[in-house]
Amino acid sequence: MSRRPNDSAQWRTAFAVITAVAIVAFVSVLPLRKLTDGLIDDYNLLADVSAVIESQEQSDTIDVLQDEAIDPLLRKAIAESRDAATNKTVAARVDSAFAAMTLHTTDSAAMTKPDAQDTVVSLPDAQPALRDENGIVAIEDYTLSKSGLSAMRSALMSGRMVRIAVVGDSYIEGDIFTQDLREKLQSRFGGSGVGYVSMHTDFPGFRRSVHQGGSGWNAHKHGEKGTLNAFVGLSQHYFTPKDGARALSTYKGDKKIKHVDQWEISRFLFVAPDGATVTMTDSDGENHTSTFAPSSSVQSMVINKITGSISLSTSTSSIKALGVWLESSSGVSVECMSTRGFSGLSLSSLNYDLCRQMDEKLGYDMIILEFGLNAMSASQKNYSVYSREMIKVIRHLRECFPSASIILMGVGDRGQKRGGELHSMSTVGNMVSAQRDAAREAGCLFWDIREAQGGNDAVVEWSRKGLIGKDYTHMSHKGGKVLAEEFYNALMMQLQ
């Protein structure tokens, strides 16, 4: 039987691979140290590969992969990092084996001389902020120009509305912390309303600053099956009407909290690829109905009228609702954008075009990132992968929202019982250090929540005072108020 034309090439490839493996295996059994008078260490490919695998299996990162509470995006990033490290180490060992085989024909000095000097990037020194003589834990400034919040300071002096987004996980869910920070800033600089609110909530009574209701919406969260990344913005959610349903959202201000019982502007942002008809009704019962042409870009419907409630409805099934903003034309708006179970890593894949279009309509002056709970476990000590991924997040947000100052917050204190006594989880400090390193390398601002709470074992006092829940992790509304006071003082000191 005649051999097919490509059989010869395939055989040569297979022979080359077999030969390479045989050579490496042969080198592995040679007493290289003895033959070269100690110049070259003995080399064993299989031992090196097994050592790499063993070290990975024994490393702290394996605990993250097995912890169901950890954000799946982080588990994926750790797995990819582990595989890349293994492949890189094996490749380097194979290269060194072949280099050793040709040692007798190569000048050893030339081999050890690097072709080029490694470029060393000098990062600013870590400046952990301890409580000063005024009782303030300062915001650490790792920006390249040390400009801090100069842009924010200018915005506050301009007379226009200044917009702050606090993006985080369940730690701030229900407007905890942001509710009290908003009240303080609006009392000092003016402003009204709660800013961003979603189209629907599964826990309508949990949030105190706005009473939200409605029906007929499907919620789409980043990373979930069926979610289209083209419509995922800073809130990491968008909403669509249920099939055949009239989608309705209702919002009413709260009189017990300052500045949120009424607002001046009601704004609805959306994408309507097939066009849309939207009706908004204010507290006087006046209907405002608008019809929009088909567009793949972000559109908005704005009602400029002081009102204490607003309802929004649409029966356009193809509309992608991005959210409602309840605010004023001046002062400060503080928005709470929380997503339960997220580590923050999903922010690195936000749709750039969508974010830029939304920023043109809204104009963000500051983005505060509060994450870490869903990236931390009691056995995990090495958070270098998380730190590296958060650097990507910060850089991407800077591209999407170029006018916004970015503050990364260190994770709050988290407790666990040891020997029947409550203490800080031993790895919280490791996470805070990793987050501070991310801020340093990305060149943004950093604020240490844990230090502001009282440092190591702060969870003990916070638990005793009812500032933290029975899970020794999440703040109560009372605890959020205390933390908001701490951050407000730090922010005012930075803005002086």
Image (cartoon, rainbow, N blue to C red):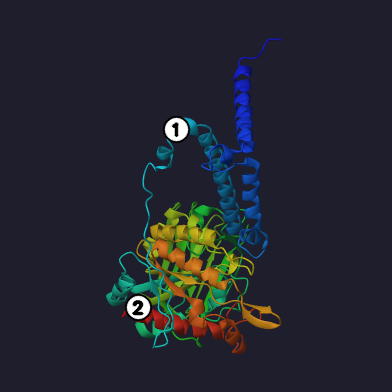
Identify which residue is drawn at 61% across, 29% down.
Answer: 17
Q: Where 23 falls versus 457 (above or below)?
A: above
Quadrant that contains the N terminus: top right
| Residue 408: mark | none
Identify which residue is drawn at 41% across, 61% down.
Answer: 442
What percent of the width, then of the height, locates residue 337? 51, 69
- Which one is nearer the viewer's eye here, 441 or 112? 112
Identify which residue is drawn at 42% across, 35% down.
Answer: 107
How many numbered callouts? Answer: 2
Q: Where 156 falls versus 381 (above or below)?
A: below
What percent of the width, then of the height, locates residue 430? 54, 69
- The quadrant in which residue 132 appears is bottom left
What percent of the width, then of the height, locates residue 366? 39, 69
| Residue 494: mark | 2
What percent of the width, then of the height, locates residue 390? 49, 61
Q: Residues within 10 Å of mark 2 (few under 14, many from 20)?
A: some
Residue at image mark 1: 106
Q: Nearer the viewer, mark 2 or mark 1?
A: 1
Q: Amino acid at mark 1?
A: Thr
Q: Secondary structure at mark 2?
A: helix
Q: Residues within 10 Å of mark 1 (few under 14, many from 20)?
A: few
Identify which residue is drawn at 55% across, 69% down.
Answer: 169
